[in-house]
Amino acid sequence: MSDATADDLSAIHVAAFIATRGWSADEIAQLQTSPHVFTVAQPNGFAMGRVVVDEAELLTVAVIPEAQGQGTGAKLLQGFERTAAQMGATRAFLEVAEDNAAARALYRKAGWLTCGQRPAYYTRSDGSTCDATLMEKHLT
């Protein structure tokens, strides 16, 4: 899905993150103007990351609800890690909602380690907040 448009990616992101505000096509297009940002996409999901010098940040992994739990997120995460390493990153970081058990399990299974927490980082559609768990991984 290398020909995915910002509209395509936004539709996936909105579907994947119903408890929060999904990213708009304009926001995605703006991110993609940076030479540091890259996208790994499949028909049912995408990962977006950024590499600056030797550090990578996983900005998002979004998988449509119908495809969750089928390995798409793991493949996208592997694609993110591979691309980040090819771009010179030796370490990667991410933030994940404390209450997103499936995503946290995916990251732990892939070798990511908890390295911190951001209190009340995410705001939900209902106005409530959720802490973010910070995770890191050394890339090979």
Image (cartoon, rainbow, N blue to C red):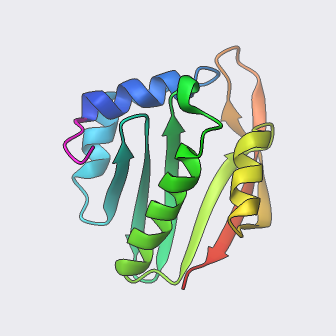
Quadrant housing residue 139 = bottom right
Q: Position of residue 13 (x, y in %)?
A: 46, 31
Q: Position of residue 75 (x, y in %)?
A: 51, 54
Q: 78 or 24: nearer the eye?
A: 78
- The correct choice, above or below, for 117 with respect to 124 in the image is below
Magenta residues span 1-5
Question: Which residue appears at 80% of the width and 37% of the height?
Answer: 99
Q: 140 or 122: nearer the eye?
A: 140
Which quadrant: the C terminus?
bottom right
Quadrant housing residue 54 = bottom left
Q: 100 or 125: nearer the eye?
A: 100
Which quadrant: the N terminus?
top left
Question: Which residue appears at 59% of the width and 46% of the height?
Answer: 71
Quadrant housing residue 109 = bottom right
Q: Position of residue 124 (x, y in %)?
A: 68, 24
Question: Which residue appears at 31% of the width and 66% of the height?
Answer: 36
Q: Is residue 2 left or right of residue 130?
A: left
